[in-house]
Amino acid sequence: MGEKKQKQATKNWYKVLAIIGCILFVVLMVVSSMGSSWVNFFSVIKPGDTVTIDYTIRDARGSPIVTTDQQLYTTVAGSGYGLFFGKQLVIQANQSTTKGVIPLPVYYREEGWSKSFALFGAEHDAITMGVIGMKQNEQKTITMPFKDSMTQAWSADQLTRNGVNLSEVQVGDSISMGVSDSPELATNTTPQTVYIRIGEVTKKTSEGVVINFGYPAIDVRIVAISKQ
């Protein structure tokens, strides 16, 4: 009797081992089909890695200005709010740029892909440093530099030259501005290459307005990581 029980127990163990073997086979097949992407899924971003991100840039009130989120764009743009749709951004982690402006191709429902949005070099660097330590599909809000100090005073004449009437401007209004390849905002000239930047009117007097072109933060999501 004891011998029969022992044989039965041995058979049960064989069955368990067979099941485990099948499971391991399936797991290996899945991992094999994923190639090297499963490694990136668990790895963190290190300096020098090439990173593809989705992003949403918001103004001081939290309203999106540029986004690569198709659902967000469809919802917000459909409500009549002016919003640019962008392409995914490819950066190198912890790599600073020597450029004053990084042009981001953007789509606007009335003009198509005819414009580029101005991301300043210091903002680009904040993103490349902010993604260090993140993983694939992880989301994070990165604080942007000089968010409260990028202001300019515009006189009534400057507004007029840019097609804006001072009497029609109110505190809290958004104003678009052309930005050249230099870090300076092009208030009086029209350079050959001009990118779009959206600012908020923070103060108004009888002489003109003060406009803040800085943004407090950018929301990022890691789409892909290419190891160095």
Image (cartoon, rainbow, N blue to C red):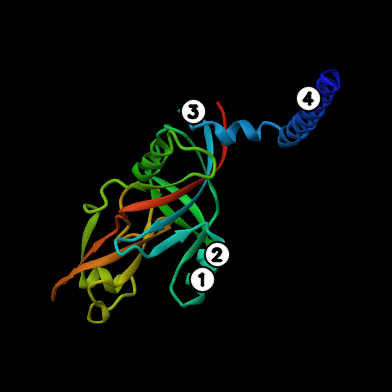
The residues bearing labels 3 and 1 have C-alpha atoms spaced at a distance of 36 Å
Q: Which residue lies furthest to the top in this view?
A: 3
Residue at x-position 77% and y-position 29%: 16
Q: Earlier in the sequence, mark 3 or mark 4?
A: 4
Q: What type is the residue that disc 3 sits on? A: Gly
The residues bearing labels 1 and 4 have C-alpha atoms spaced at a distance of 57 Å
Q: Do the residues labelled 4 and 2 touch (CB within 8 Å)?
A: no
Q: What type is the residue that disc 1 sits on? A: Thr
Q: Which of marks 4 and 2 is nearer the N terminus?
A: 4
Residue with the mark numbered 2: 71
Residue with the mark numbered 4: 13
Quarter of the picture containing the C terminus is top right
Q: Position of residue 19 (x, y in %)?
A: 79, 32
Quick check: 161 above or below 50?
below
In the rendered structure, the answer to whether residue 35 lies left or right of residue 163 reads right
Residue with the mark numbered 1: 75
Q: Are marks 1 and 2 in contact (CB under 8 Å)?
A: yes
The residues bearing labels 4 and 2 have C-alpha atoms spaced at a distance of 52 Å
Return the residue nearer the eye: 74 or 174: 74
The residues bearing labels 3 and 4 have C-alpha atoms spaced at a distance of 49 Å
Q: Position of residue 154 (x, y in %)?
A: 22, 65
Mark toward the viewer: 3 or 1: 1
The residues bearing labels 2 and 3 have C-alpha atoms spaced at a distance of 31 Å
